[in-house]
Image: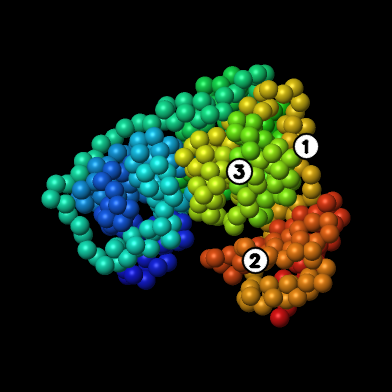
Amino acid sequence: MTTTDPDNLATVFKAYDVRGLVPEQVDETLARAIGNAVVGVLPTDALVVGHDMRPSSPGMARAFAEGAALAGADVILIGLASTDQLYFAAGSLDRAGAMFTASHNPAAYNGLKLCRAGATPVGAETGLVEVRERVAAGEEHRAATPGTIEETDVLDAYAAHLLSLAPVRGRRLTVAVDAGNGMAGLTAPAVLGRLDVDLVPLYFELDGTFPHHEANPIDAANLVDLQEAVRASGADVGLAFDGDADRCFLVDERGELVDPSSLTGLIAERELAKDPGAAVIHNLITSRAVPELVSALGGRPVRTRVGHSYIKAEMARTEAVFGGEHSGHFYFRDFWRADSGMLAALHALAALAEDDRPLSEVLAPYARYAASGEINSEVADKDAVLAELEASWAGSATEIDHLDGMTVTFPGGTFNVRPSNTEPLLRLNVEGDDRDIMTDVRDRVLAVIRRDR
């Protein structure tokens, strides 16, 4: 089976991107075919292409460009880039974009993310299915006049743009950064090197084999080195990025992980200060402290499903100034509604530099409740478990909704259980007014989810 076989395409084309094992599922042949197909689907005659540090990425980026040029598109290759750097290029150059990366996936994987001009996302409902169908048809499109391929560097312009959106002024900070051998090894020096900070670098060497740990900061095991570095160096803050550096997680001065909902609250307050009364997007597993804060500040909290396509669609619909997801994605209207882990980090540094208090105290007002974090359980019949949970909580819940899985509001807190789209998993998030409430509800819900059936 080739990588362009319909059965393989059905596997590697996901809801938001293309991703699979190299070279069994994704290779340069597939990349070239996708580049050729994209020109007719988006449609576009101008593209910008970037890639991460995985060994297979440069070849696939070049093959994509060749396929697109064959179909008549003019292509700019920006070389090594973070995903938000690619979004910057697509926005500032007003071109459709392709980013070759497998994000936080292990070294054996690669793939690509697509966007339209202005960094508007492309997913299954907005063109990705049509791209897959064109590739499956096996028809190569040749323009009467092929397009051109040129190379340019946007790293300095990207850094300057981010710093214009979130200037960092005030006291000198010590900042530990774990790039995880991913693209933050390129972007962190370019951006943070312009600031009055003492940088403590971890794993800045670009290495798509990830020799130290996976570049997936949502897994606490991958934050241990950063936590130790923060404590050892006396850093004011630690920053951890995923492989393509579009997500950022924070560690405070004690070496404790910062809840992404607290960072969402902090950035929401800063962005609402620029645009009072604006909408702020939060997904349904974000702490309820976020909509409470947004409302108190006179903003309009807007709740969405989990997933960047839903966040970006709601940002466009509501003209929201900012959006935050519990997974470490943060979206900014001033950044073409795209997500940028580095811009989120700059907001945190700016708030900290302006304040004499340590980060834990700066963020304390945004951490009002006790949260379980996401707990995954393998379940054979997800629908049956959800039905049992709903029946068991119907009498005590004050509200049950099904925006994404099932969200139960009860006296003293909320919980959400939602099925994975790609695995036989149920994902549980619980929040309570205090730790005792959260722990009790967490254990009761898990007892149902994990019961032998």
Q: Marks 3 and 1: which is nearer the front?
A: 3
Could you say where residue 182 lies in the image, as x and y percent from the top left?
A: 50, 41
Is residue 59 left or right of 83 when viewed as pictured? left
Q: Residues within 10 Å of mark 3 (few under 14, many from 20)?
A: many
Could you say where residue 243 lies in the image, as x and y percent from the top left?
A: 51, 45
Q: Residue at x 69, y 42 (%)?
A: 294
- Mark 2 vs 3, N-terminal side: 3
User: Relative to 212, is 403 above or below?
Assistant: below
Q: Marks 1 and 2: which is nearer the front?
A: 2
- Identify the element where label 1 is drawn: helix
Q: Is residue 71 in view from this perspective?
A: yes
Residue situated in front as seen by the camera: 270 or 358: 270
Q: Callout 1, which amino acid? A: Ala
Q: Callout 2, which amino acid? A: His
Scheme of image coloration: rainbow
- Mark 1 vs 2, N-terminal side: 1
Query: Gap in Å between the C-alphas at discs 2 and 3?
Result: 22 Å
Could you say where residue 398 lies in the image, as x and y percent from the top left?
A: 79, 64
Q: Residues within 10 Å of mark 1 (few under 14, many from 20)?
A: few
Could you say where residue 324 lies in the image, as x and y percent from the top left?
A: 61, 45
Q: Which residue is mark 2?
A: 402
Residue situated in front as seen by the camera: 3 or 394: 394
Q: Which residue is mark 3?
A: 279
Query: Gap in Å between the C-alphas at discs 1 and 2?
Result: 31 Å
Q: Is residue 212 in view from this perspective?
A: no
User: Relative to 136, is 168 above or below?
Assistant: above
Q: Which mark is residue 299?
A: none
